[in-house]
Image (cartoon, rainbow, N blue to C red):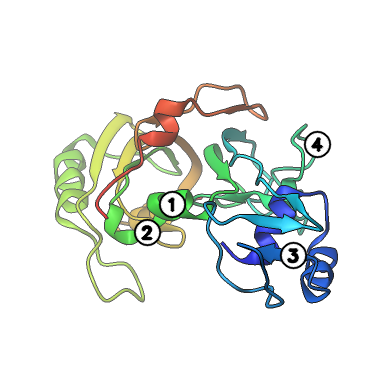
């Protein structure tokens, strides 16, 4: 982690104040003043500020049940941020592991641990995401098997070089389906249905990896240790 980040995570200093203290040689790494705020440091290093040992706050891992018309950024833009009104401290330090569109509801994983979120979103991890999809028109009974086959084989999305990875389509009712994908391309689910001639009018994420959404809309909870550990994958 960068030295300025380490200082911020261990104190109540703002980033600019932390940088100033680093430039003032108030911060020692293993007894030596390091004045470069972007120097990489490790939790095992002994880092002090004016002689006081710094210990970073533990990382936070949580799930939020995202309502529609919110955005997965930690500042309000066209829609309010997902974090607005949540009783969580220092939301500016948090980020989302896998964004949802403003009109999509459901499971969002949130953390301040960049390595953990990278393990979830990096393309080679093939982390499973399960969505419930509402469609604008009916899937005819005689189309079902063909659609399942097309999703399983891979679809050609506009502007993409490769087919999508095999996806599992389950038809729930004539206008509703459940889709399991292992990628996270921009607007992926909507684009996959568009590729087979369907418009998505409702989208809800219910599961990421082994973590199942189980809080009410707008609520959040910390993940259990087992849930946090469940994303360890291929190095
Ligand atoms: N795919 C989409 O099209 N939108 C989302 O919000 C998530 C996946």
Question: From the image, which quarter does the C terminus lie in?
Answer: bottom left
How crowded pointer 1 is (Cα within 10 Å; few <14, some 14-19, many 20+) is rated as some
- Give the mark nearest the N terminus, 4 or 2: 4
Q: Which residue is mark 1?
A: 199
- Above or below, comparing residue 102 to residue 138 in the picture: below
* Image depth: mark 3 or mark 1 in front: 3
Q: Nearer the viewer, residue 189 or 108?
A: 108
C-alpha distance separating marks 1 and 4? 32 Å
- Above or below, comparing residue 121 to residue 19 in the picture: above
C-alpha distance separating marks 4 and 2? 30 Å
Please state the horizontal and vertical placement of residue 35, each as a whole percent of the image.
72, 77
* Quarter location, residue 174: top left
Question: From the image, which quarter does the N terminus lie in?
Answer: bottom right
Q: Secondary structure at mark 3?
A: strand
How crowded pointer 2 is (Cα within 10 Å; few <14, some 14-19, many 20+) is rated as some
* Image depth: mark 4 or mark 3 in front: 3
Please state the horizontal and vertical placement of residue 152, each as a whole percent of the image.
17, 49
C-alpha distance separating marks 4 and 3? 35 Å
Q: Which residue is mark 2?
A: 122
Q: Which mark is residue 85?
A: 4
């Amino acid at each position: 982690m960068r030295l300025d980040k380490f200082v911020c995570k261990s104190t109540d200093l703002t980033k600019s104040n932390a940088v100033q203290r680093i430039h003032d040689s108030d911060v020692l790494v293993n007894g030596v003043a390091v004045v470069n705020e972007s120097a990489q440091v490790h939790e095992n290093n002994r880092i002090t500020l004016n002689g006081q040992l710094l210990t970073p706050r533990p990382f936070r891992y949580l799930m939020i049940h995202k309502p529609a018309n919110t955005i997965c950024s930690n500042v309000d833009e066209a829609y309010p941020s997902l974090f607005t009104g949540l009783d969580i401290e220092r939301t500016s330090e948090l980020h989302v592991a896998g964004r949802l569109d403003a009109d999509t509801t459901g499971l969002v994983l949130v953390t301040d641990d960049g390595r953990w979120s990278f393990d979830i979103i990096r393309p080679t991890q093939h982390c499973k995401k399960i969505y419930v999809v509402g469609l604008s028109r009916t899937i005819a009974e005689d189309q079902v098997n063909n659609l399942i086959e097309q999703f399983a084989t891979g679809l050609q999305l506009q502007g993409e070089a490769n087919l999508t990875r095999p996806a599992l389509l389950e038809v729930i009712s004539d206008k509703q389906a459940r889709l399991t994908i292992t990628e996270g391309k921009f607007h992926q689910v909507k684009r996959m249905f568009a590729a087979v001639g369907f418009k998505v009018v409702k989208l809800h994420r219910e599961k990421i990896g082994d973590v199942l959404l189980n809080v009410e809309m707008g609520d959040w909870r910390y993940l259990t240790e087992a849930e946090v550990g469940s994303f360890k994958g291929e190095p």
